[in-house]
Amino acid sequence: MNGRTYDEVSVGEELPALPIPLTRTLIVATAIAGRDYQDVHHDPGLAVERGSKDVFMNILTTNGLVDRYVTEWAGPSAVVTAIKIRLGVPNYPGDTMTLTGTVTAKHDEGRRVEIAVRGENGLGAHVTGTAVVRLPGKGAI
Amino acid sequence: MSAYEDFAGREIVPLREGPDPVNVPMIRHWAEAMGDRNPVYLDDAAARATGRPGIVAPASMTQAWTMRGYAATVEGSSAGAGARELNALLEKDGYTSVVATDSEFEFHRELVVGDRVSVREVVESISPEKATALGVGRFVTTVRTYTDQDGEVVAVQRWRLLRFRPKAPSTEKREPKAPRPRPAINRDNAFWFEAAREHRLVIQRCSGCATLRHPPGPCCPHCGSFEWDAAEASGRGHVYSFVVNHHPRHPAFEYPLIVAVVELDEGTRLITNLVGVAPEEVEIGMPVALEWLDADPDLTLPVFRPVAQEEQD
């Protein structure tokens, strides 16, 4: 797995888009892997009773997918120092969420790179936010 | 001070240790489910090759180490007296549903195998009641501080939940709605409503000096000419001003009702409704685009929906 050094990244760089098919199994499996047993993330009947149209992805998974998205791009040496997200429309089964990202800032102190991340599904923006990763210096990888 | 305001600054979950130390099997379940193939989570040699002491857990997994798990979720037991008290208050007011809206994580260090993660949670604020797309509710903002076996902070998370009263399921039969009030149509403004029925938004234009005007009238306020024609509007504009109408209620409308003055890109303003947006999300200056409301066979009206800034161009 290749990675990026701090110097190789420039503000304005766009990350390759990552489409994620939102299967029912993904929504349930990720919730359980994070020990989130709230019924709205696995029981369609109770989800409807609670005002949703179906089960929906939990926020820990959205964090996990944003984490995966930025570190796949940044490489295994990158250290994630912040993930700040706001949820919009839910991720329901059968849809696809496409993650996109743009480098918005570089901080030489700590070689931190800020990435604005957005995840869109068929209903609109599921997630908007920022991730910060610390990248290795020149010659480190 | 309301009972909700009293919660600001209160600890609702006292320091509580996660049931399991950071461990590879749980990391594997997480990474597999997320489709995350970063080798530093499962391969000790690969992690060392990046300068780490060994396998690390994904940063986003921090919260998972302190989740209460299946049994506590099913029993509905809360993690602390403060959380129980807050839940009782929210349930009493009918806010029975919950959805997470924000998570702002700052990670102080990576978690390594064997770390014991604890969390404590303090209320930052509880919002007044707000109307949202899901139903009426309150936003509960807390700060969760995650610490390790030595009491050192490993991560801080600002966390926001919407506690809400679910709207009645849409399968419920509703009374047929009353028709919207009829506009007062006269010889001066009939052309505007006729164009609307054809889904064309037009603006009256003076034939003398080309000044646009709205609402329609017989005479140009700029040059006094009685001659006019109509220009087609682009359908783009921004919110110039708005009010949210709660009372009195007319049976034709859904409440809260957003009544807005939209300034079109052409410069004229019209009174309209906003759709596809919760009242508390509306902002002065927000860009909007035209949509048509076919209210009934005799009445079509322009309404506006917020659009993202980038969609403007």
Image (tube, coloured by chain):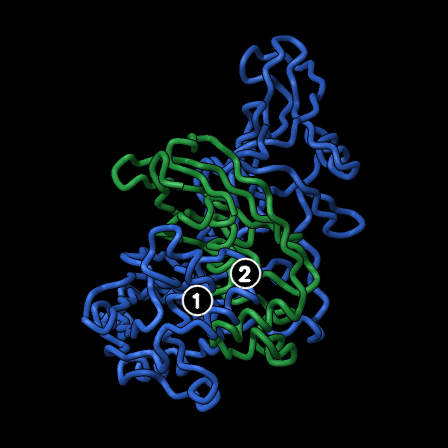
Left or right: where does residue B137 sit relative to residue B290?
Answer: left
- Indicate the chain on which mark 1 is placed: B
Q: From the viewer's perspective, is the residue at label 2 or at label 1 nearer?
A: 1
Q: Residue furthest top?
A: B208
Which residue is tagged 1?
B162
Instruction: State the SS at label 2.
Output: loop
Looking at numbered disc 2 in the image, what kind of residue is underneath it? Ala
Q: Considering only vertical position in the picture, is B10 above or below B261? A: below
- Could you tell me which residue is drawn at 34 percent across and 66 percent down? B112
Looking at the image, residue A83 lies above or below residue B29? above
Q: Mark 2 points at which residue?
A: B133
Which callout, 2 or 1, points at the residue further toward the start of the chain? Answer: 2
**In-front residue for pair B161/A85:** A85
Residue B49 in sight in this render: yes
Chain containing mark 2: B
| Three-letter amino acid code at the position of disc 1 | Leu
Q: Which residue lies furthest to the bottom in this view?
A: B75
Q: Estimate the x, y position of residue B123 in percent, counting from the top left.
A: 27, 68
- Secondary element under disc 1, as helix, strand or loop, is strand
Please identify which colour was used for chain A in the image.
Answer: green
Residue B130 lies, in percent from the top left, at 43, 62
Residue sitting nearer the eye, A119 or B225: A119
Residue at left offset 28%, top offset 34%? A108
What residue is at 78 percent from the left and 47 percent from the top? B298
The hue in which chain B appears in the rendered picture of the protein = blue
